[in-house]
Image: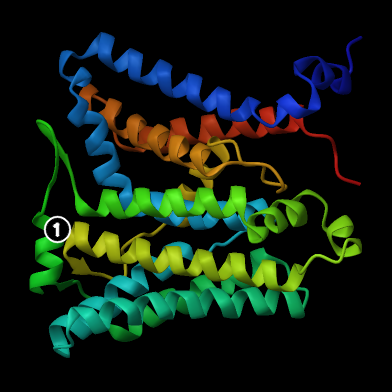
Amino acid sequence: MTTFAEVRSRLARPQQRRYLPLYATLALLAVMYGSGVVQYEAFSDPQVVLNVFIDNGFLLVVAVGMTFVILTGGIDLSVGAVVALTTMVSATLLEEQGWPAFVVLPLVLLIGSTLGFGMGCIIHYFEIQPFIVTLAGMFLARGLCYTIGTSSITIDDPFWTSMAQSKVRLGDNFVSPSVVIALVVVLIAAYVLAFTRLGRNTYAIGGNPRSAHLMGLPIARTRISVYTISGFCSALGGVLLSFYMLSGNSLHAVGMELDAIAAVVIGGTLLTGGSGFVLGTVLGVLVLGLIQTLITFDGRLSSWWTKIVIGALLFAFILLQRLITPRKR
């Protein structure tokens, strides 16, 4: 009888296994896009893919921050609430307090980074599970939203409006400025993870925390940094969402933390940490966006089918991760 370990060893050599989830996601994306092109004539229009980026630019930025956290073997459940808090603070300061945009923007990014920094410090120095700490952060941020206001606040600020209405032309097609910002974030994150000491330490801590400790790596600085990065990305994602929605609302981004985690896992990053790529996260976000687009083109299925398909894909990718990774002792 073939054992579980034998199946795993036959899949590929150890150095190649880390790329298998990425290849699987790329193949899935190709199949989904090909299926759409075959079924719907308009699906082959390049603007369809660009619209996926336009509709998910904020999620992409949040998922990039989540990638850093999951690479260390952690989790951040607060990102959706921080996104909502950013939209509410931005809308209140711009519309009710009359603050200028160039003051509000750095302030909300600082708030998100500070929340991430605080959670990172508690996780490391008090040795509390990231799930518990970030769950508390989620309730804190969502609660702060409701203390600011319970109704939606429309944003009419000229800068926000121009960012929402501007288009970056790509021949006959276009993307929004938010997409350009999201792609810049992706490039910076990929560079940091591939070519900097922080990136190498992030992979090392996620791969084997005990070995990283024995090697004298700066675990505290790295762990706190990744949660700070996640907080910054959540706040920036909130800014992009406020560009997209032109409003602040306490109910914005409910469940976005789960979408971000799903995008990272479907993109091939191991939930146990130590292996994954930012490019995979981009592919994961595209998979989520294409599922929604296919359902929209079909026109007969409820949007809840998006959640059902994502759930099935998560089961499949978690099983794939289990097959290609050894158990940690």
Give how far across and how far down residue 134 sits, in percent: 59, 69
**Above-or-below relation of 103 to 317:** below
Q: 164 above or below 145?
A: above
- SS at badge 1: helix
Residue 160 seen in the figure: yes
Q: Quadrant of residue 286?
A: top left
Identify the residue at image location x=19%, y=49%.
176
Relative vertical location of residue 109 with respect to residue 57 in this rendering, above or below: below
Q: Quadrant of residue 150?
A: bottom left
In percent of width and height, residue 202 lies at 68, 57
Measured from the top left, where is residue 261 in percent x and y? 53, 49
Above-or-below relation of 88 to 320 = below
Three-letter residue code for mark 1: Ala
Seen as rendered, the residue at the extreme front is 195
Closer to us: 295 or 222 = 222
Residue 19 place in picture, x, y as percent: 64, 28
Residue 73 visible at all: no
Residue 241 in the figure: left or right of residue 210: left
Mark 1: give few (<14), some (14-19) or many (20+) Cα within 10 Å.
some
Q: Which residue is mark 1?
A: 164
Identify the residue shown where x is 52% and y is 27%: 25
At a point 38% along the width and 75% down the height, the residue shown is: 109
Camera-side residue of 104 and 119: 104
